[in-house]
Amino acid sequence: MNTALSARWRAVHDLQKRRSAFPANSLQSRVADHAGVLAVSPRRTATPYLAHNALRDARIIVLRQEQLEQRRFPKPFYGTAENPDGLDVRHEFDRLTDPWVEPTELEVEESDRAWKAHYARIRATLAQKDLRLAEVFDDMRDDVSVDDSAIRLGISRGYVKKMRLTVRAIAMSMRAS
């Protein structure tokens, strides 16, 4: 028991030295830090290769976590291969979105008319597929909760959630075209 404990703490000591040899928050530092956590775990057997095995496993875990994080939170469009100049065009806006310029009544009417026409096209497409999809779309517009939609339509919450996903997919595909 004593040799297992000393092997475990020797591995942790080696991993801490390794972690301090690299810049803070670098990949090597994070891997060594996570390997220290793995080495302390009672599920791992204390062998002479504990530090090596913990480093190998920690590297896999840290890289997998980074990949998941990149998928969940993609980098912004600006300064990427699709936009190599790195031009941030978010500051460019038209008169309708400029908070300092009041839009004219004619501009507001045109915008409302275009929005209502687009909404009507989406709703008609949804109603052709299933009338309840159009009703769920109306509920989404009116900020009706999933629970209230389910009660009003007489269907389950899970089915309302599936219908909302379908509505979003159809609306996004119509927006792209």
Image: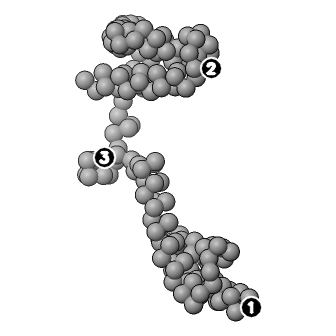
Location of the N terminus by quadrant is bottom right
Q: Secondary structure at mark 1?
A: helix
* Labels 3 and 2: the sequence-earlier one: 3
Relative horizontal placement of residue 39, taking residue 1 as reference (left or right): left
Q: Is residue 13 above or below residue 26?
A: below
Residue at the bottom extreme of this rendering:
3
Residue flagged by tag 2: what amino acid is it? Answer: Asp
Q: Secondary structure at mark 3?
A: loop
Label 2 crowd (10 A; few <14 / some 14-19 / many >=20) = some
Residue to which mark 3 is pinned: 87
Residue flagged by tag 1: what amino acid is it? Answer: Asn
Alpha carbon separation for disc pair 2 and 1: 58 Å
For the point 49% across and 15% down, the residue is 136
Residue to which mark 2 is pinned: 147
Residue 161 in percent (x, y) is at 52, 25
Residue 96 in percent (x, y) is at 39, 20
Q: Nearer the viewer, mark 2 or mark 1?
A: 1
Location of the C terminus by quadrant is top left
Q: Nearer the viewer, mark 3 or mark 1?
A: 1
Q: How is the image coloured?
A: one colour
Alpha carbon separation for disc pair 3 and 1: 61 Å
Q: Looking at the image, do the residues carrying marks 3 and 2 touch, with CB atoms under 8 Å apart?
A: no
Q: Secondary structure at mark 2?
A: helix
Label 1 crowd (10 A; few <14 / some 14-19 / many >=20) = few
Q: Nearer the viewer, mark 3 or mark 2?
A: 2
In this rendering, does residue 160 appear at all?
Answer: yes
- Toward the viewer: 66 or 153? 153
Residue 70 in percent (x, y) is at 43, 53
Residue to which mark 1 is pinned: 2
